Image (tube, grey):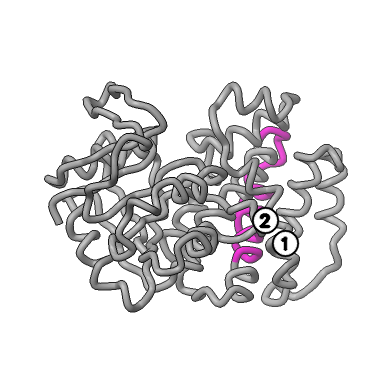
Amino acid sequence: MRTITIVGPGMWGTALAVQARRAGLDVQLLGLEAERLEAGFEVTALADTAPTGEAVLLVVKAAAAVDAFGALAPRLDPQVPLVICSKGLDANGPRLLSEGVHEVAPAQVVMVLSGPSFADEVMADHPTAVSLAAQPADLPQAERLAKALHTRHFRAYVSDDPVGVQIGGTAKNVVAIACGMARGLGLGANAEAALATRGLAEMARLNAAMNGKPASLMGLAGLGDVFLTCAGPSSRNFSFGMSMAQGRTADAAEAEIGLAEGRRTAHLLPLLARAHGVEMPIAEALEGVLTSRLELASAIDALLERPLRRETSS
């Protein structure tokens, strides 16, 4: 593999472009409009050109991902891997982004890149490991892409579970907001650890209901990303939750720290869980807070008052 196309010149898209160039790949960077980035990349307007890479990385905010693919699909060979790098859900459903993509183009080869990966650290060439998931029939292409992106400090581990990798990358943002709120309220490290752990248990229930593999949530895209995003203010979602707990509105918090994907996901994740008959109390409570249906203190009380059960049940 010698060329790669990246759709989305934001922080994560630029970081992946820097990594691809570091690995020796020629990079085509597409965006909504032509521009030149500080990292030295020329961005071509998506409407003006066709993707030329041997793989296409879709790195736009989750809410726009399926629409962006819809604009791209007529000019993309279905056998060229489309790699979803966004962490969120498609509001049409709600559903996984891969499900939205397959509705637009059922024959498209789709992969998912996710895992503990702050963009600034990837750009700085700090050691990073991620999951690259594909359907079993597409694993040879995934292995080829993983090898192409590989450098001494960047490694993609290939997975055959796109469902589990997407659930981990999506739901951990919601849990990170909850942990940030706990920090902002001064509830202590015990509470933060409990939220992160029980949040992972909620993910596992949804993962099982959607036929994802348990190992995925014990890997980079699950436990690894929870560890990263729930650990402190370096995470935007954690910072967003902390800022809200300190009295800012959701809009003010996001204006201060930038896009927090978990804010949008929090409205969709409980709907997805209900559609699959799964309880996700932390996600439900956070959705209530973000929609002003619940006061933060009431949401915490509701979680604390849940019936006692065995840890391995619910």
Q: Helix, strand, or loop for circle 2?
A: helix
Say which amino acid is labelled 2.
Leu
Q: Is residue 35 above or below residue 219?
A: above
Can the viewer see residue 106? yes
Task: Say which residue appears at 50% left-offset and 55% top-offset.
Answer: 169
Q: Which residues are magenta?
A: 184-203
Residue 294 is a magenta residue: no
Residue 57 in the image, given as x and y percentages of width and height:
34, 49
Mark whose residue sits in front, 2 or 1: 2
Q: Residues within 10 Å of mark 2 (few under 14, many from 20)?
A: many
Say which amino acid is labelled 1.
Met
Q: Helix, strand, or loop for circle 1?
A: loop
Chain-order first, disc 2 or disc 1: 2
Viewer-proximal residue among 109 and 152: 109
Left or right, residue 36 beside residue 104? left
Viewer-proximal residue among 83 and 244: 83
Q: Overall secondary structure of the magenta stretch?
A: helix
Task: Say which residue appears at 87% left-offset and 58% top-offset.
Answer: 305
Which quadrant is the C terminus positioned in?
A: bottom right
Left or right, residue 212 beside residue 83? right
Can the viewer see residue 222? no
| Residue under pointer 2 | 269
| Residue under pointer 1 | 280
Cα–Cα span, label 2 and label 1: 9 Å
Cβ atoms under marks 2 and 1 closer than 8 Å: yes
Q: Is residue 116 above or below residue 31?
A: below
Which image quadrant is residue 196 in? bottom right
Left or right, residue 302 beside residue 160? right
Which quadrant is the N terminus positioned in?
A: bottom left
Circle number at residue 20:
none
Residue 238 in the image, given as x and y percentages of width and height:
58, 39
Viewer-proximal residue among 26 and 44: 44
